[in-house]
Image (spheres, rainbow, N blue to C red):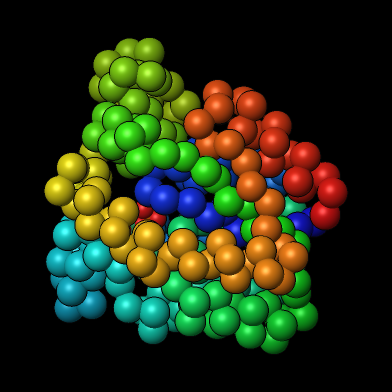
């Protein structure tokens, strides 16, 4: 059992790899992005405010995302938790260690997925996902076998994210470099950081992640 953070810029492949770990190791994915997208559709005032910030590519406040994680972080579960897209700021990182300590749990690894910006633009602008099961596709590199149908669950609810466009991506990258990338140094200094090449083939990235997990 291991609790891990997947760290990396938008489009690094965090969600894709998290889904594999859920299937292969019965780990529990905690994606603040998914939780916030759910809140967006709730029709509440909070959902409306969150949508405005997210669609522009900015970060939602620490208070909101820490609250969301706090709700989901119960005692040990399955093969452990995958924190996907959280923490994204130093205060969030501190809040996570405090929360884990309170639940008697530890953080076993922080896996940084390294990719360069050119690859991110191409990955993000062609991306679509299944609204039912979360399977991730790409127009050029991984289209669904039957157009408009999810290979994994057969749903026809294939969607593009409102923030997967070039303008919002520019803001998301700026937010990443300004507020999230300092976490790389933070976890490195704590001796918790491992780095994998996020530009490799999906299976090769999964194998690198497996190596890190097998050492925990
Ligand atoms: P993601 O699905 O991880 O790419 O997140 C999509 C968007 O949700 C981000 O661009 C932010 O607006 C918001 N978001 C997700 N996770 C966080 C977080 N940990 N802190 C602040 N904002 C977040």
Which residue is depicted at the point 46% across and 62% down? 181
The percent position of residue 55, horizontal first and vertical second, equals: 18, 58
Residue 96 in which image quadrant: bottom right
Rendering coords of residue 44 (x, y %):
20, 74
Q: Residue at x 38, y 60 (%)?
A: 177
Q: Residue at x 49, y 67 (%)?
A: 182
Q: Quadrant of the C terminus?
A: bottom right
Front-most of residues 79 and 62: 62
Give the answer, above or below, for where 206 lies relative to 187.
above
Can the viewer see residue 84? yes
Q: Which one is in front, 70 or 13?
A: 13
Relative to 183, residue 204 above or below: above
* Image x and y of residue 123, in percent: 34, 32
Residue at screen point 61% across, 33% down: 205
Left or right: where does residue 117 sit relative to residue 194?
left
| Residue, far top | 145
Query: Left or right: 190 with respect to 63?
Result: right
Q: Position of residue 134 (x, y in %)?
A: 42, 41
| Figure quadrant, ligand 1 | bottom left
Q: Is residue 39 visible?
A: no
Q: Nearer the viewer, residue 188 or 63?
A: 188
Relative height, residue 129 to residue 169 (above, below)? above
Q: Which quarter of the figure is the N terminus placed in? A: bottom right
């Amino acid at each position: 059992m291991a609790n891990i953070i997947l760290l990396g810029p938008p489009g690094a492949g965090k969600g894709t790899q998290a889904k594999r770990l859920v299937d292969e190791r019965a780990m529990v994915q905690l994606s603040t992005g998914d939780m916030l997208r759910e809140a967006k559709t709730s029709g509440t005032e909070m959902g409306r405010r969150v949508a405005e910030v997210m669609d522009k590519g900015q970060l939602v406040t620490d208070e909101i995302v820490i609250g969301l994680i706090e709700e989901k972080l119960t005692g040990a579960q399955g093969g452990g938790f995958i924190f996907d897209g959280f923490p994204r700021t130093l205060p969030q990182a501190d809040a996570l260690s405090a929360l884990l300590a309170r639940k008697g749990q530890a953080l076993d690894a922080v896996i940084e997925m390294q990719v360069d910006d050119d690859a991110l633009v191409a990955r993000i602008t062609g991306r679509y996902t299944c609204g039912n099961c979360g399977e991730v596709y790409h127009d050029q590199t991984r289209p669904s076998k039957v157009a408009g149908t999810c290979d994994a669950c057969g749903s026809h609810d294939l969607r593009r994210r409102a923030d997967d466009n070039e303008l919002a991506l520019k803001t998301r990258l700026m937010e990443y470099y300004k507020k999230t990338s300092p976490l790389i140094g933070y976890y490195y200094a704590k001796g918790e950081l491992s780095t994998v090449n996020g530009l490799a083939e999906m299976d090769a990235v999964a194998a690198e992640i497996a190596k890190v997990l097998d050492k925990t």
